Amino acid sequence: MKSPHLMGVALWLFVTACAVPGFAQDTASAGSPAGATIRVAGRVLDSQNAVPLPGVTVELVGTDVVAYTDVDGRYVLDVPAGTHEIKVVLDGYEEQTVRVQAESGQPVDVNVALTMAAFAEQVTVTADVVESSMSSAATQLVERRRASVISDNLGAAEMRQNADSNAAAGMQRVTGLSVVDDQYVFVRGLGERYSTTTLNGATLPTTEPDRRVVPLDLFPAGLLESVRVSKSFSPDQPGDFAGGVVEIQPLSLPSRAVLDASFTIGVNSQTAGETGLGYSGGSRDFLGYGNGARELPTSFPDRRVVRRGGIFTPDVGFLREDLEPLGEAFENTWDAQPRDSKPEQSYNLVYGNRFGRLGVVASVTQGYEEQFGDELWRTFRVGGEEDDLEVFSDYAFQTSTLQARTGVVGNVAWQFSPSHRLGVNNFYTHTGSDETRTYEGFNSDIATTVRDTRLFWKEEALLTNQLIGDHHLSGFGNSRVDWRVAYARADRDEPDLRQTLYEFQNGQFVLADESQSGFRMFNTLDDQSVDLALNWSVYTTTWASQPMMFKFGPSFIRRERDFRSRRFRFVPLVTFGADRSLSPEELFTPANIGPEDSFEIREETRPTDTYEANQDILGGYAMIDLPLSNRLRLVGGVRLERFEQTVDTFDPFSLATELEIVRSELETTDVLPALNLIYALTPSANLRVSASQTVNRPEFRELAPFEFTDVVGGRSVVGNPDLQRALIRNVDVRWEWFPRAEEVLAASFFVKQFEDPIERIVEPTAQLRTSYTNAESARNFGVELEARKALTPWLVAGANYTFVDSEIELAPAAQQVQTSLTRPLAGTSKHLFNALGELRFAQRSSLRVLYNFFGDRIVDVGSEGLPDIIQEDRGGLDVVFSHQLAGRLNLRVAGVNLIDDPFEFTQGGKLQRSYEVGRTFSVSLGVSAF
């Protein structure tokens, strides 16, 4: 995979940086008062419903310094150092006066909530200054309290304090969430297929060929402002919803100049000073970008590489002498070699500022890490005795991985009037992963010991470009219109996966003539989406003169995917004369490749290894945000979605005169109602009740009736063209109390009932394969408890606990193969627990201790009488120490996974798989220029 997107975004940022200083100079000279000033910034919101108020006059009392809020209710004032009064005025609302203490060199954030004139108890109020970052824990709790749906928030400041490197690492600390394989989020016990991920409100394509999920480890923490998980549905959200919507908000425009840089270096106890595995790859692997060395040789044709004269190819294909140079064109690198470890490291740079009506923010992050480890892996079969399992294969794995990440954010917004703003948002992330894996052990199928080696390189990239607009239309019923035109592209490139298998025969290991030996594979995936949406919010008053809102709008999402795969293998010829005990590099030399020699290259690409797919979702909604009384608020409405999906699979090398296409289609129209009630028990406590109906739809491959095999091998998987979308009925109740900043006490209950849930099963074929079916029913209910409290000014403690009980019921026809027709949902942990303790010393230092625990969960469903494979419960302990060294210099020392409990998997009570990831220690140094 190349890096044109990164180069393009970097060039765009460079041009922006060059153009901005001149513009900034003009605006600054026009509007800044003489002498040293302090920047005062904040937001003005409606006190009843937290709606941003644009066009508000914000005046420095006694001067001619005046600002007006933008469409997000934001304002910026430059004031002299000292004590001032700021007057906030808007027609129809009561005027407020805020006293501000502006100390030299210290920017101040002042947020103001205005009350409508009919309900104000006094005309002038002296407000407290609120100093907080938009990504802080206190601000995120305020956003959560004011939200119209049941939600949980995690800000970037909290992620930094926890030493979380990406969004996935942060999500595991949120109430009711667990993370599987360090990248897939399960919300309230529901698998990754039941969660939707958005960026700035726009849906995203995925780099995963077989999963309906966006891996959250693709999002570096340094590029994020916050992540919000909406757990109840509202009509302005995507209708494909069950567990929750993960709403990722990248860095937002700052209210003042920001220039931050940080560097982190770390070591892992299993990697530091150790020798792992590696091979000669590309010169830019440490950056995550291959240099083309793994690409399919340019000499390879665009047609199937087969030998002419075969049973099915008597008149087409290549002569044997023509196949020889093709086989010799591959790089002759197969075996794992010793590799010394390097320390983990990451870099992050953020710049942002406002220049009059123009705001910019840009960030670049880059990171590198390695992981060495050993793993035990067994498979079982049913023994002679009931419930007795016999070991079928017993392997010892040795795996070394390196991973390099690069991320870029570049956003620009132009406030061309107090009521109108345009913005351009750009987000790019790229990950390169290299895995060298060997395993050795006894295989009962061939009754001997085998040794397998695999070299696997993968690149994943996600690019989004968004044009957005916000407009306050006072002449149209005091309404606000926001819209977006978003393009996103997810790429996945797996060039030249290489695998060899040796069998132990006559006292030595020899090359096996098996399908995975001498094997090379090339995969590419291109998934693109266009997301168009418009939201029109009309603000008015009720019969009791309370503020209310009507909101409606259309949306359209177009998604297209192109997947290509090519497979090759060096096949031993009948004239094979080489010593099969030699290493792969000695066997697959040019001297041994040819019609009269030992090996011949053959293409083993399957007719189902290429497919194209597209998906259209046309939606529209109407909803109301209505105060029924001073305390009771109703947010509800209905969403209508028309869904169309087509998957075409075909053999690009077909010898037929016309391309034979196997097509799968699904079309549905769904009406999705939602009701959210919020009762304000006190100004700081809410009781929320939510009810809704949502859907869950098949992913591209789940619907297509063709057989494929996962990239890493294993059972074949075939889609089911008869799949139907699942309907989910959701009920949620939450009580929440926010006593003070950074404090919360909450309890939630939820229940979900599934109709025709989509489930992965095993089919009773000669060679067992997995497929998908609509189960008869499923249900999921649970309880969430959360508390966070400042016990003293220097001690903060918090914890959250989730209990989930789930059950799925398969059709009786599945009894032929499935071990159980009734079981918990795969991936669901019945118990989840997080704890936090933080000591703060003299406002300059803090020590944070974090604990995370998940309970047992099914990772592979049992079949043919074998029990389910269970991942055993596990806890993790992290400690982070932060200290402000001097001025704007900050130090952070972190220890992650200090307990280092092993990851263990069992089947029928017997250990099936086990590995450890080691303890990681890191030191980070950060500096802020402003």
Image (cartoon, helix red, strand yellow):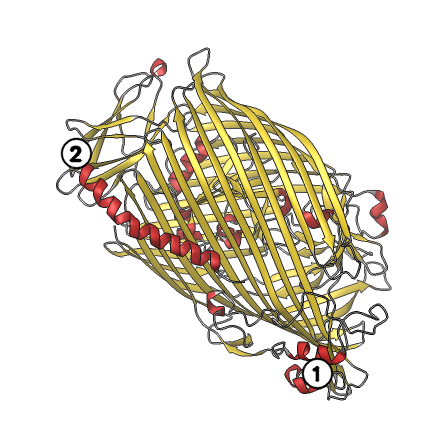
Say left or right for 79 vs 641.
left
Q: Is disc 1 placed on a helix, strand or loop?
A: loop
List the single residue furthest toward the left.
35
Picture layout, residue 501 above or below residue 737: below
Q: Position of residue 80 (x, y in %)?
A: 16, 38
List the single residue furthest toward the top.
543
Picture layout, residue 847 above or below residue 287: above
Do the numbered discs 2 and 1 sit on residues whose CB atoms are within 8 Å?
no
Q: Position of residue 914 (x, y in %)?
A: 63, 65
The quadrant the N terminus occupies is: bottom right
On the image, numbered disc 2 is attached to which residue?
Answer: 83
Q: Position of residue 811 (x, y in %)?
A: 82, 42
Is any part of residue 860 visible from this angle?
yes
Hey, what amino acid is under mark 1? Ile
Task: Give the Cα separation between the discs numbered 2 and 1.
Answer: 84 Å
Q: Position of residue 60 (x, y in %)?
A: 20, 29
Query: Residue at 31% across / 56% down in the picture?
Result: 883
Taking depth in this image into account, of 501 and 888 the one nearest to the observer is 501
Specify few, some or many for label 2: CA neighbours under 10 Å numbering under 14, 14-19, or 20 or more.
few
On the image, numbered disc 1 is attached to which residue?
Answer: 593
Hey, what amino acid is under mark 2? Thr
